Amino acid sequence: MKKASVYVTRMIPQENIDELQKHFDVDVNPEDRALTKPELKQKAKGRDAIISLLTDTIDDELLDAAGPQCRIVANYAVGINNFDVAAATKRGVILTNTPGVLDDATATHTFALLLATARRLPEADKFVRDSKWKGWAPMFFIGMDVDRRTLGIAGMGRIGANVARKAKGFDMKIIYADIRRNPQAEKETGATLVDKETLLKESDFLTLHVPLMPETHHYIGEKELKLMKKTAVLINACRGPVVDEKALLKALQEKEIWAAGLDVFENEPEIVPGLTGLDNVVVVPHIASATTETRINMGKIAVNNVIKVLNGQPPDTCVNLEVLKK
């Protein structure tokens, strides 16, 4: 009996590939880059399943190219903003993601960015590496205190609540804004629900954990940045387009806020010109989930979803549940 065909759009941990190969014919993009749309369409042709990344747009065009036998596209990511959910649902194609396993790594990374930005660690590191350090000085690299400051959290979901729990170790006051209340997080961390304007005005550190959707595109823009304290620090480890990057550049240049720590960018891998030249911004290349255990566990979820669907079973983390009802 002919094995089902699975295409993996970018190399994921080898043990995940090995597990897939026990069950299916597997083809993996051998290049360390995202495929172009024409390349992806060609590689998707005739596949029964695709394991995709956030850099892969899964839409009408791609699904048409794959063909009617394609039963599942499993995102190697928790985000689904690369999915045209309606297009897949119309065709009966199951979409899945990898929620839950990224929470600890992303929350820890968020706090690492917060601390690195507050204490100006990248600047200080470069200063030493450039052989500029001549000895201790009382006014070298003066940063911001973190202990007992106000942490504002935009989006108190799993990751936001995880960040809040970490913040308790620094005795921070925690406020948050969300479309719904999180009583459990409030109980565990003492967090207080506030409106967005209050969040912006009162936060010493503001971390972003909202999903990317039309309502959250440019959640932080020129108007919002002007409401923040001039001593405030903005941290974004969710999705780049949540922040208007040009407005942020202007705010940092004009010292409307003190600093920013960014893991994600509006048009990755492009960054708005001028941003990386500023001393008051820490930039890293979208690595919030980049721990060995996390990446392997992401792969396990994606692979298990493919195995289950191609064996006639429902997946563990279906995005478009209505497909399962058909």
Image: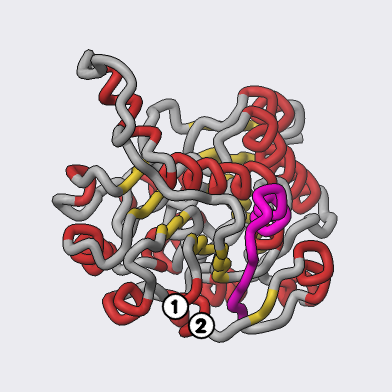
Label of residue 201 in the image = 1
Asked whether residue 50 is in view, the answer is: no
Residue 27 in the image: x percent, y percent?
54, 32
**Could you tell me which secondary element the residue under label 1 belongs to?**
helix
The residue carrying pointer 2 sits among few (fewer than 14), some (14 to 19) or many (20 or more) residues within 10 Å by Cα, namely some
Q: Is 173 covered by the magenta stretch? A: yes
Q: Amino acid at mark 1?
A: Lys
What residue lies at 21% left-to-right and 50% top-to-bottom? 275
Q: Which residues are magenta?
A: 162-178
Residue 166 rendering spot, x and y as whole percentages = 69, 50
Q: Residue 36: tell me if it is visible.
A: yes
Q: In the structure shown, which secondary structural element does the residue marked by tag 2 occupy?
A: helix
On screen, residue 239 versus residue 275, left or right, reads: right
Q: Amino acid at mark 2?
A: Thr
Q: Residue furthest front?
A: 138
- Spot occupied by residue 86 in the image (x, y as percentages of width and height): 55, 77
Mark 2 to mark 1: distance in Å? 5 Å
Q: Quadrant of the N terminus?
A: top right
Quadrant the C terminus occupies: bottom right
Q: Quick check: marks 2 and 1 in contact, CB under 8 Å?
A: yes
> At x 55% / y 35%, what residue is drawn?
290
Viewer-side residue, 178 vs 308: 178
Q: Is residue 137 left or right of residue 185?
A: left
- Disc 1: CA contacts within 10 A as few (<14), some (14-19) or many (>=20): some
Vertical position of residue 176 compared to residue 252: above or below: below
Task: Report which residue position mark 2 lands on.
Answer: 198
Q: Give the residue at x 49% y 74%.
A: 202
**Residue at the left extreme of this rendering:** 273
> Foreground residue, 150 or 52?
150
When asked about the image quadrant of residue 2, the answer is: top right
Would residue 294 be counted in the magenta stretch?
Answer: no
